[in-house]
């Protein structure tokens, strides 16, 4: 998928646009669910099928894993675009991600991510480039 980031706003009906560049890559029938850092993950239909397959393999006897799987599956929602390319962000997902108006949409490492602008700025405020370089080196050498 393409790199890039975009700033958007929810409209009065809590709708937003996924950038056209990303919509093309997602294809028809993409999904939105909870992500780490209290953001939202946007998966293509194929990616979501992989996520669901993985989560359905969780042992029903491992409560911490089962709780995480339930959380992701419960909050998964198939986005429906209107004829102007806007999607509704459901209230339960907006609340989890603390999205009220301004959003950051960007291509993350595994999928497209939607963040409230405030949470995104808070998340990135303590970036330490030395730690980041160490983490990247460890991934590269793995």
Image (cartoon, rainbow, N blue to C red):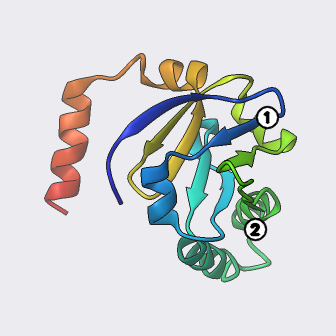
The residue located at (79%, 76%) in the rendering is 61
- In three-dimensional space, the C-alpha distance between marks 2 and 1, rounded to whole angstroms, equals 31 Å
The mark found on residue 14 in the picture is 1
Spot occupied by residue 75 in the image (x, y as percentages of width and height): 79, 56
Left or right position of 79 against 142: right
Query: Which numbered disc, 2 or 1, marks the residue closer to the eye?
Result: 1
Q: Which residue is more in the foreground, 70 or 74? A: 74
The residue located at (33%, 54%) in the rendering is 2
Residue 115 vertical placement versus 126 (above, below):
below
Left or right position of 70 against 101: right
Q: The N terminus appears in which quarter of the rendering?
A: bottom left
Q: Quadrant of residue 66?
A: bottom right
Q: Secondary structure at mark 2?
A: helix
Q: Which residue is more in the foreground, 112 or 14? A: 14
Which residue bears the numbered disc 2? Answer: 66
Q: Quadrant of residue 99?
A: top right
Left or right position of 56 against 135: right
Spot occupied by residue 45 in the image (x, y as percentages of width and height): 60, 74
The residue located at (70%, 35%) in the rendering is 97
Residue 134 vertical placement versus 116 (above, below):
below
């Amino acid at each position: 998928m393409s790199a890039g980031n975009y700033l958007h706003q929810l409209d009065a009906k809590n709708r937003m646009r996924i950038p056209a560049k990303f919509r093309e890559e997602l294809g028809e029938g993409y999904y939105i669910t909870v992500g780490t850092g209290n953001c939202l993950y946007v998966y293509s239909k194929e990616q979501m099928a992989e996520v669901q397959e993985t989560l359905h393999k969780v042992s029903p006897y491992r409560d911490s894993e089962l709780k995480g799987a339930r959380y992701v599956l419960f909050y998964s929602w198939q986005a429906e675009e209107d004829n102007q390319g806007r999607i509704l962000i459901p209230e339960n997902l907006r609340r989890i991600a603390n999205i009220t108006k301004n959003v950051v949409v960007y291509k993350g490492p595994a999928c497209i991510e939607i963040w409230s602008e405030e949470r995104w700025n808070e998340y990135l405020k303590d970036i330490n480039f030395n730690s980041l370089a160490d983490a990247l080196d460890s991934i590269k050498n793995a």
